[in-house]
Image (cartoon, helix red, strand yellow):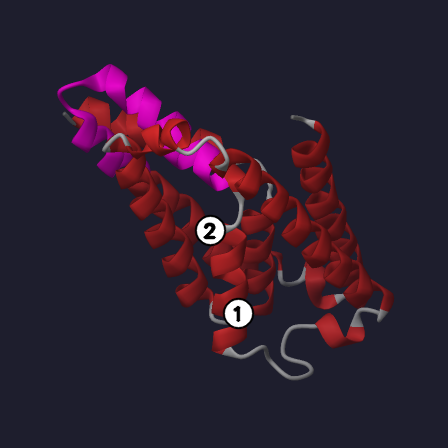
Amino acid sequence: MFETALQGWLVAISLILAIGAQNAFVLRQGLRREHVAWVVAVCAISDAILIAAGVAGFSAASKALPWLGDAMRWGGVAFLLAYGALRFRAALQGGESLAPGEGPAASLGSVLGTCLVLTWANPHVYLDTVALIGSISAQYAPHQTSFGIGAALGSFTFFSALGFGARLLAPIFASPRAWVVLELVIGATMWTIAAGLAFGG
């Protein structure tokens, strides 16, 4: 069972390692040191819920509701375009307002709201957790639960490292220019993901 849990951990890490909307947001909050524990908790708990649904076979919902995939896809495109535009606007405003510790901090409510939308409105999250992890777990029958637990722990490990480890990069981001570059990279990442969803079929 331990080996099965370890496989789940490794699968989860490999799936969420690539930079994406959710990861970019966690990184940004970690650099700003704003509500990091809350953001990590929301991401990890959300992933655990989705992984549990996938392991339990909830991915069959996409077959029962043929329109669900397209609805998630275009909803995700719209949100990613809007969020990317906000990041480009922040970059155009310059780095001063982005420096950690300067300017008004974002409220916990607004941060959690953005985090929840980036998580639950992101089709890639469902693909990785519900569809892929759910289908892979079936290969480890009758120990799917151990696989799912390992995958959930992998998600928690990754988001904790990303959120709390971001402060190690703080000296680099003491420069306003570095924050501008980060905002541009995040904005470009959001739009690239949106284009992939829109034109990737």
**Do we see residue 10 in this rendering?**
no
Q: Where is residue 127 in the image (x, y as percent from the top left)?
A: 47, 32
Per the image, the residue denoted by label 1 is 111
Q: Position of residue 51 (x, y in %)?
A: 32, 38
Relative height, residue 166 to residue 152 (above, below)? below
Q: Position of residue 121 (x, y in %)?
A: 52, 50
Q: Which residue is drawn at 60% across and 48% down?
A: 75
Residue lying at the far top of the rendered structure: 139
User: Which residue range is magenta in the image?
Assistant: 125-151
- For the residue pair 126 and 175, the one nearer the viewer reads as 126
Name the residue carrying label 2.
Answer: 120
Q: Residue 13 in magenta?
A: no
Q: Are marks 1 and 2 in contact (CB under 8 Å)?
A: no
Quadrant of res 4: top left
The crowd level at tag 1 (other Cα within 10 Å; few <14, some 14-19, many 20+) is some
Q: Does the magenta stretch include residue 147?
A: yes
In the rendered view, would you say 125 is above or below 200? Answer: below
Question: Magenta segment, principal secondary structure?
Answer: helix
